Amino acid sequence: AYQPQPAHKFTFGLWTISNRGRDPFGEPVRDPLPPNDAVAMLGDVGAWGVNLHDNDLVPIDATAAERDRIVREFKAAMQQHGVVCPMATVSLFTDPIFKDGAFTANDPQVRAYAVQKTMGAMDLGAELGATIFVLWGGREGTETDACRRPDDAVKRLREAVNYLCEYNIAQGYQYRFAMEAKPNEPRGDIYMSTTGSYLGFIPTLDHPDMVGVNPEVAHETMAGLNFTHAVGQAWDAGKLFHIDLNDQNPGRYDQDFRFGAANPRAAFFLVKFLEDVGYAGPRHFDAHAYRTEDYEGVKAFARGCMRTYLILKEKAARWNADAEIQAIVKAAHGDGANLGPFSADSARALANREFDRKAIAAPGLAYEQLDQLTTEILLGVR
Ligand code: XYL
C-alpha cells in the first residue's frame, strides 16, 4: 500500500532533492548531486516527474554546445529512469544581476535580460516536454519602498508576462503559466504576496486564459493564511494550474518541510480538497530534507512526502464514506431552496419572507463532534 504510481503524478524539483542544506548561517552539508543522478534517485523512489529551473540543469555561463550536450544527456537519463518533466521554471533570483528584482527592476537592461533568460528557460522546458511554466518572482520586491512605486512594479510585471505569453504563442509552445506568490524571503517584502494577489492580477493580462497560479503551502502559511482556502479560490477561478506541496510553521523562515511534517491536519484538508474536486495536475513537492540528512535521508524525505499524501488520500476516502460524519455534514447544510437568480418578483418575495431568527439560530451544528471524528480518523482509531 501507499506505493507511488505514475497516475499519482508526484513530482519533485531538481533543486529539492539536490538541496545541499546551505542556509544563511551555514555551509552545505551534502555533496553536489549531479542532475542525472538526481533523476536516478527520483526513479528509484517512484516519483513520476522532475521539474527544474534553467540553472538547476544548465549553468548560467554554459556555451551553446555545452548546453546542448547537458540537455541531451539529461533527456537520456529521464528516459532511462522513466521520469518525465511536466514543469519548467526560471531562476530570476540567484544571479547578482537580479539584486533589485528581475521583471520589476528599475534598470531596463535587467528587465530585458530577465525576459531573455525566461525565453531561454521556456525553450529548455519545451525541449524536455514541459507544458507548465512556473514564474516565482523571488527578487521582485523591496527592502525600502523609497526605490520605486509599487504600482510601477505591477505595470512592469504585466508587461513582462504579456511579452512571454506572446513568445509562447509565436513559438507554438503549449505552456500554461503558473504564477507563484510568496510574502517575503529573500526580499524584505515581495510584490504579489499571496495567491489572491495573482488572482486579481491575471484578469488584467492580454492573455488571461494562458495564466494561472502555483500556490505553495509554505508561502501562504508564512503569511498566516489558510492554504486550502487559497487553493479553493484558485480552483473556483479555473486557475489551479500547478501546486507546490511542502509544510511550514507560521511565523518562521521559509522552512520547506516534508509534506505533512508540520501540520498533518491542514495537509489532510488540502489532500481531501484536491481529491474531492478531481484536480488532475501534478502533485509537486517543493520541499527539502532537514540539514541533518545525508542522501539516504533525502530519499527518506522524498518517499515520506509521497507516502503521507497517499495516506491522507486514503483517510479522505474514509472520511467521505463515514456515515456518522456525512450525517452531520448533511444536517449542517439545512433545508430550503437556494436564493436563485435576481428578479423584481424574487426580490419582492424575499423582502416579504419571514425568518424565525431564534428558531434558525437555536440548534447546535455538531462541529465539535464532526471535528473529533475527523481527528479520530487521522489518529487511526476510526
Ligand atoms: C522558493 C520557491 C521556488 C519556486 C520556483 O521559495 O518555492 O522554489 O517554486 O522558483
Image (spheres, rainbow, N blue to C red):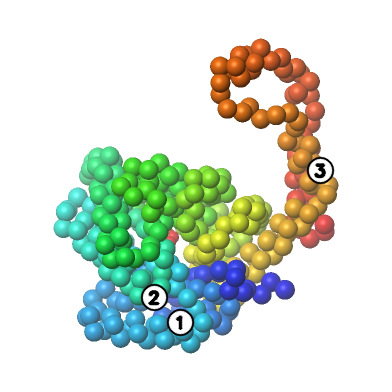
Picture quadrant of ligand 1 = bottom left
Disc 2 secondary structure class: helix
Q: Measured along the vertical axis of the image, is residue 238 above or below residue 348?
A: below
Residue at mark 2: 128
Q: Residue at x 42, y 86 (%)?
A: 76
Mark 1 vs 2, N-terminal side: 1
| Contact? badges 1 and 2 (CB < 8 Å) | yes
Q: Does the residue labelled 1 lie within 8 Å of ligand 1?
A: no
Q: Does the residue labelled 3 lie within 8 Å of ligand 1?
A: no
Disc 1 secondary structure class: helix
Q: Measured along the vertical axis of the image, is residue 55 above or below residue 339?
A: below
Residue at mark 3: 327
Which quadrant holds the C terminus? bottom right
Disc 3 secondary structure class: helix
Amino acid type of disc 3?
A: Ala
Residue 173 picture quarter = bottom left
**Relative to 71, is 2 on the left or the right?**
right
Mark yes or no: residue 165 visible.
yes
Amino acid type of disc 2?
A: Leu
Say the numbered circle drawn on residue 78.
Answer: 1
Mark yes or no: residue 92 visible.
no
Q: Measured along the vertical axis of the image, is residue 347 above or below residue 277?
A: above
